[in-house]
Image (tube, rainbow, N blue to C red):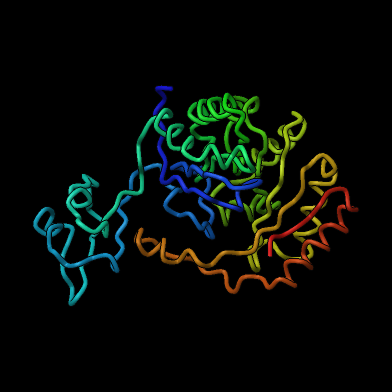
Amino acid sequence: MSVTVEITNISRASLHDGPGIRTVVYFKGCSLKCLWCHNPETISKNDEILYTPIKCIHCGRCIKICPENHKIEGNDMVLLRENCKRCKECVKNCPTGALASSKKQTTVAEVVKELMKDIHYYRQNGGITLSGGECLLQADACKEILEECKKEDIHTAIETALNVPWGNIEKVLPFCDLFFADLKILNSKKHKEFTGSENGLILENLKKLVDSGAKVTVRIPLIPTVNDSEEDIKLFAAFLCDFASRLCGIEVLRYNNLAESKYLILGKEFTDFGTPQSDDELKSFCSRLDTSLKNETTVYCIL
């Protein structure tokens, strides 16, 4: 277990990333740049400096260390990111964690050691989930983590957009009990507009994954005005109809607009797509998609 792995966080006691109580590993780096992403710190594979103003006590240590990139404006400390070389000396010397690093470089062995702390939960009802970003960009690390967990009979899951070479997916197939596969937009041009990439590889990989016999739940992140029209429902149904009966289900995800603070601490622009769907709107979308698929699988949302 000597493989190096780059992550942003390990989150414990999650209830929405697979069956039961989960521990989730968030991998650093993604092959998509979705404008609505609620984990923006995972998109870039590069390390980024996070600055949380509410934690700042204005001690001035960062200014003494790097006056070129830190200064006081009024009552606030300002991080000048443009010329930052990310040496992280300011992070190392920040006493409150107001300045932090978005990337943790560690080893598979250390990740597995952390995951095993909650093994008593997994064995009752739960497991581990690899997420991101796009965890399958680090397929070798994923394979080793999953393989070690399966030795302990731990349920394993992966959350993925499938925008990776098929070979990456093949590496983890023998050790993954459940895949959550994002399906965002069917129109390839529109997909590129909102995610930075066309969707051909994603659609091809999803079909292959289902054909492999893997357990797959398709997830549709429902974004207001982007993929929630009647035309979108028709496109989703037309693509999914051939293999819907072999899916574990289709989960429709409510739009999440609560990530603005994450963009602020990254110094990035937040794109707001409006008000999250009401319960009735979510249920209506699920019902219409279910009807279009002739009830071949379960279409559901978590309210």
- Residue occupying the far left of the picture: 64
- Residue occupying the far right of the picture: 294
* Left/right of residue 159 with respect to residue 2 in the rendered view: right
- Residue occupying the far bottom of the picture: 74
Q: Is residue 169 above or below residue 202?
A: above
Please state which of residues 67 and 153 is positioned toward the viewer in this rendering: 153
Q: Is residue 237 above or below residue 52?
A: above
Q: Residue at x 73, y 36 (%)?
A: 215
Q: Residue at x 57, y 69 (%)?
A: 273
Q: Is residue 205 above or below residue 217?
A: above
**In the image, residue 25 lies at what x, y percent?**
49, 42
* Left/right of residue 24 with respect to residue 50 in the rendered view: right
Location of residue 286 by image quarter: bottom right
**Is residue 81 in view?**
no
Give the quarter of the figure containing the C terminus. Answer: bottom right
Give the quarter of the figure containing the N terminus. Answer: top left
**In the image, residue 112 lies at what x, y percent?**
46, 32
**In the image, residue 231 lies at what x, y percent?**
78, 62
**Is residue 283 in view?**
yes
Q: Residue at x 36, y 58 (%)?
A: 266
* Left/right of residue 192 with respect to residue 11 in the rendered view: right
Report the number of numbered marks. Answer: 0
Location of residue 46 by image quarter: top left
Location of residue 247 by image quarter: top right
**In the image, residue 100 lies at what x, y percent?**
29, 53
Q: Residue at x 41, y 62 (%)?
A: 263
